[in-house]
Image (cartoon, rainbow, N blue to C red):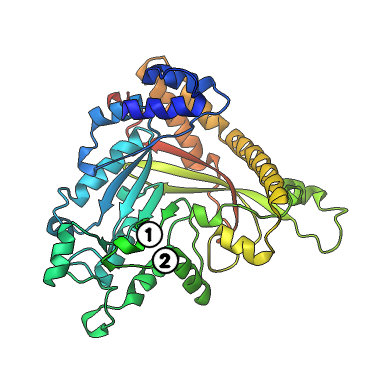
Amino acid sequence: VSSLEAHSMHSLNSLYRSKLSLEEEQVRNEVSDCKIIGLTLETRPDYVNPTELRRLRTLGCTRVQIGVQHTDNQILKTINRGHTVEDSMKAVRLLKESCFKVDIHLMPDLPTSNPEKDREMFKFVLETPYLQADHWKIYPCEVTPFSTIEKWYSEGSYMPYTEVRDTAQGKDPKLLVDLLVWTKARVHPWIRLNRVIRDIPEVSIIAGNQNTNLRQMIFKELAKQGKYCRCIRCREVRDWPEDESLLRLAKRWADGDHAGLPDGVVCEVMIMNWQGYRSSDGDECFLSFEGSIDRGVGGGATERGMKKRQKKEDKRKKNKKSRKQQAESSASSALAGQGSFVVAKLTEGAGKCVTMQQSLWRRARSWVVGGGLEDTTPKDNAPLYGLLRLRFNDNGLTERHK
């Protein structure tokens, strides 16, 4: 992994010099004009321990993906997964305490599972404080060549519930879509749902879900039911609004910033929201700049944006993307400023004794969790312009967090 990451940083920054060591490439990356801002590595839940976390940090890893797969230990045992849901909970806690972003993988339609068990799995992950990940990837089980599951499928001991239409046996191709529609309509607004299908070529799928555009099917069904997904990916601003000049901060709007606008011009009033929740022996805060215009039902940010207007020519789209990035950068900077007190208090004691660090940690946590920020309820389906996550471990800055 070290050699691969060094090669990636070297390729990004220069193809006209010899590759340096990982440490040297990391230093060059820090000061380069074009830089890698994050590194995601994947491992098993039962491999996450303090030693491995230090190694991941040395590699420059910022986000870790782990295959939780399911919360039913009997299902995990059947597929010979080699770990339990308790291992997954412990892994999430260790990663969160060590300031990694966490991406968990969940797999419906596994052998011995059914729609009811999978619905309970998603419900448990959403409700328990011990699996509150920052990102999700939902990978419906698919039968592929040269696998043990292919053997089970050939023998008839495993049949995906998406494979045949037989409601008496609980098998129906629409069952998976209904399950994922139910799930997406309940995903917390602080979770980014990165994927809802594994990118496997259709010719390599023997059985199971074979709809490579499954996410689009889910969007259509959500719209049909008048529902929507609140995850970060579905609400991110993308191509809306047409012009960042139509964005207004709530305070400026209240002070008369809307005066002089032409009739019929719709402005997006941005509000800073704060939502707190428990997560793996700690308090987490999700701060976000959100708009006030409902995004509508159905699909994700891009799909809804395309429904509202025709596709613009390439040059105009490129210019608009540049303006949007500038607006998002400004919004992110402003949002970071809102949390500057917390960040400053958390870092002020760096290099001092542990007792001083713990004192600052308690003051910062008390300020945020205890009422320094008012817990707000944002508009349910508002576009998302910027976000900031804060976490406060119950044990503070103890020896194990060094």
Specify whether residue 243 is in view: yes
The image quadrant that residue 78 belongs to is bottom left
* Residue 85: image tag: none
Question: What residue is shown at x 41% (from left), y 22% (from top)?
Answer: 357
Q: Are marks 1 and 2 in contact (CB under 8 Å)?
A: yes
Could you classify mark 2 by the number of other residues whose Cα lies within 10 Å: few (under 14), some (14-19), or many (20 or more)? Answer: some
Secondary structure beneath disc 2?
A: helix
Q: Amino acid at mark 2?
A: Leu
21 or 130: which is nearer to us? 21
In percent of the image, x 40 and y 59: which residue is there? 196
- Which residue bears the numbered disc 1? 197
Question: What percent of the width, then of the height, locates residue 46?
Answer: 20, 41
Residue closer to the observer: 372 or 399:
399
| Numbered disc total | 2
Residue where numbered disc 2 is placed: 214
User: Gap in Å between the C-alphas at discs 1 and 2?
Assistant: 7 Å
Q: What residue appears at the point 57 percent right and 62 percent down from the top-left corner?
A: 303
Can residue 157 be seen here? Answer: no
Q: Residue 152's image quarter?
A: bottom left
Image-quadrant location for residue 319: top right
